[in-house]
Image: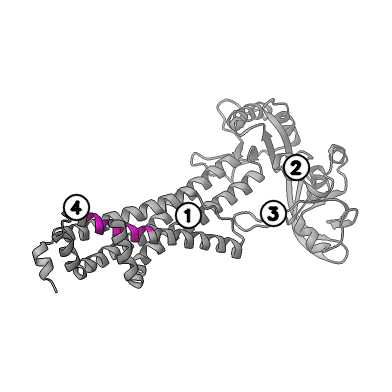
């Protein structure tokens, strides 16, 4: 009965009912769209970090101060191939790659391009779960010979070779001519916007010997068998490197170890905070919408005083009147909530389509927004409903 009366009242004042629910619509749409975009961004960043070695550790040379900052003025002992080899002996380690980076100008004879050169070992592809799309990767024989071969990133391929097949063609890098044996698959940009496909990979020994003239290793990239073994592997690597590098018990490490897991956890925490913050801000619209519902319901009580008096005169009790207006308030909120859900999903999908950003619409966020809309309807409908139920039926019938 109360639901039917509420439906009739809302139907008879369609435009006013729509304006009443507008705050709820905006609030629910904002909550869903903001949370879904934030969650989608978090998932994208986590995927990118994981694709760059979610089970990996990286060893750098250098001292760390008590605050965790790198001491740039310290007399650093560089990492070498010997350090990488002792790490390879550990049972907990799955793959190891020496990394030597530099930047230089490369040329295919017609065009020039300044790019990043990454010297690595063949295990680099397994550590980063990143493989050639075409051609092959260099092998251990190429490492031993410091071969003049390279594998180019997708961006380098598009810039220097456009629509032609670069496999087997040559690139001039420094004073040497390198043969292209492969093209890496595309992995896109980092969260900061850096193009990860704008690089050339080659045997680290070739970078050391022909481009940098050094035997030093910039860093050592390591993959373990599972994320659960990262801490164990880090402790084992620290122990064996201290022995290999002759570090005394009273001396601090002249190297440090980082993992992608730390970055992933940081991103998760930041995105969680952002989701709560944005959701809270969007929820303000729901509260504003609730105030609007309360105001309109108070107006409705004044307009329908005679109706209330007639219902009381034919036997309706205070509780019946209270329920009638409370149901009407909740129905308005739920209608606004439903429309907000539809608009919020549409905004999320449209934003994803126009910007290329991934969005993640969770059932939990939809249910929470809907439940909060219903709660707003109840909380802000109680006062008008109580006011209506307390009317004196005799005075209500005299009202004109």
Residue 33 image point, x, y percent: 48, 59
Residue 76 image point, x, y percent: 64, 40
Please rate how many residues cluster around mark 3, counting C-alpha atoms within 10 Å: few if below 14, some from 14 to 19, many from 20. some
Magenta run includes residue 329 = yes
> Residues at badges 1 and 4 in contact (C-beta under 8 Å)?
no
Where is mark 3, residue-wise? 196
Q: Which residues are magenta?
A: 322-334
Where is mark 2, residue-wise? 125
Where is mark 1, residue-wise? 35
> Residues at badges 4 and 2 in contact (C-beta under 8 Å)?
no
Reading the chain from its start, which is encountered first: label 4 or label 3?
3
Reading the chain from its start, which is encountered first: label 2 or label 1?
1
Residue 324 image point, x, y percent: 25, 57
Q: Secondary structure at mark 2?
A: helix
Q: Quadrant of residue 166?
A: bottom right
Q: Is residue 36 visible?
A: yes
Q: What secondary structure prevails in the magenta region? A: helix
Nearest to viewer (mark 3 / mark 1): 1
**Whole-Å distance between the Cαs marked 4 and 2?**
72 Å
Nearest to viewer (mark 4 / mark 2): 4
Residue 374 appears left or right of 69: left
Q: Secondary structure at mark 1?
A: helix
Nearest to viewer (mark 1 / mark 4): 4
Please rate how many residues cluster around mark 1, counting C-alpha atoms within 10 Å: few if below 14, some from 14 to 19, many from 20. many
Reading the chain from its start, which is encountered first: label 4 or label 2?
2
**Whole-Å distance between the Cαs marked 4 and 3?**
67 Å
| Near-viewer residue (62 or 238) | 238
Reading the chain from its start, which is encountered first: label 3 or label 2?
2
**Whole-Å distance between the Cαs marked 3 and 2?**
14 Å
Q: Quadrant of residue 24?
A: bottom left
Q: Secondary structure at mark 4?
A: helix
Whether residue 256 is situated above or below residue 9 in the rendered picture = above
């Amino acid at each position: 009965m109360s639901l039917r009366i509420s439906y009739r009242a809302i139907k008879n004042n369609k435009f006013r009912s729509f304006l009443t629910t507008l705050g709820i619509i905006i609030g629910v749409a904002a909550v869903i769209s903001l949370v879904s975009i934030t969650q989608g961004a978090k998932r994208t960043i986590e995927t990118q970090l994981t694709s760059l070695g979610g089970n990996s550790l990286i060893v750098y040379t250098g001292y760390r101060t008590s605050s965790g900052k790198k001491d740039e003025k310290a007399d650093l002992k560089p990492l070498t191939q010997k350090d990488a080899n002792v790490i390879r002996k550990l049972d907990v380690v799955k793959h190891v790659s020496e990394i030597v980076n530099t930047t230089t100008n490369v040329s295919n004879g017609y065009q020039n391009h300044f790019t990043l050169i990454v010297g690595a070992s063949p295990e680099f592809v397994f550590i980063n779960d990143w493989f050639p799309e075409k051609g092959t990767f260099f092998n251990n024989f190429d490492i031993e010979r410091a071969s003049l071969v390279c594998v180019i990133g997708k961006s380098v391929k598009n810039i220097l070779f456009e629509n032609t097949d670069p496999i087997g063609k040559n690139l001039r890098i420094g004073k040497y001519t390198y043969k292209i044996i492969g093209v890496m698959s595309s992995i896109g940009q980092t969260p900061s916007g850096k193009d990860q496909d704008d690089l050339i990979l080659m045997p680290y020994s070739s970078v050391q010997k022909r481009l940098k003239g050094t035997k030093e290793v910039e860093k050592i990239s390591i993959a373990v068998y599972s994320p659960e073994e990262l801490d164990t592997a880090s402790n084992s690597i620290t122990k064996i490197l201290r022995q290999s590098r002759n570090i005394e018990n009273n001396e601090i490490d002249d190297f440090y170890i980082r993992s992608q897991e730390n970055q992933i956890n940081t991103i998760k925490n930041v995105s969680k905070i952002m989701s709560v913050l944005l959701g809270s801000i969007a929820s303000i619209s729901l509260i504003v919408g609730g105030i609007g519902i309360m105001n309109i319901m108070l107006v409705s009580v004044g307009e329908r005083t005679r109706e209330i008096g007639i219902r009381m005169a034919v036997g309706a009790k205070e509780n019946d009147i209270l329920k009638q207006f409370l149901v009407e308030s909740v129905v308005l909120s739920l209608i606004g909530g439903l429309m907000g859900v539809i608009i919020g999903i549409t905004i999320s999908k449209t934003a994803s389509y126009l910007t290329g950003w991934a969005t993640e619409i969770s059932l939990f966020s939809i249910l929470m927004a809907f439940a909060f809309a219903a709660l707003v309807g109840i909380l802000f409908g109680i006062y008008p409903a109580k006011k209506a139920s307390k009317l004196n039926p005799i005075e209500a019938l005299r009202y004109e």
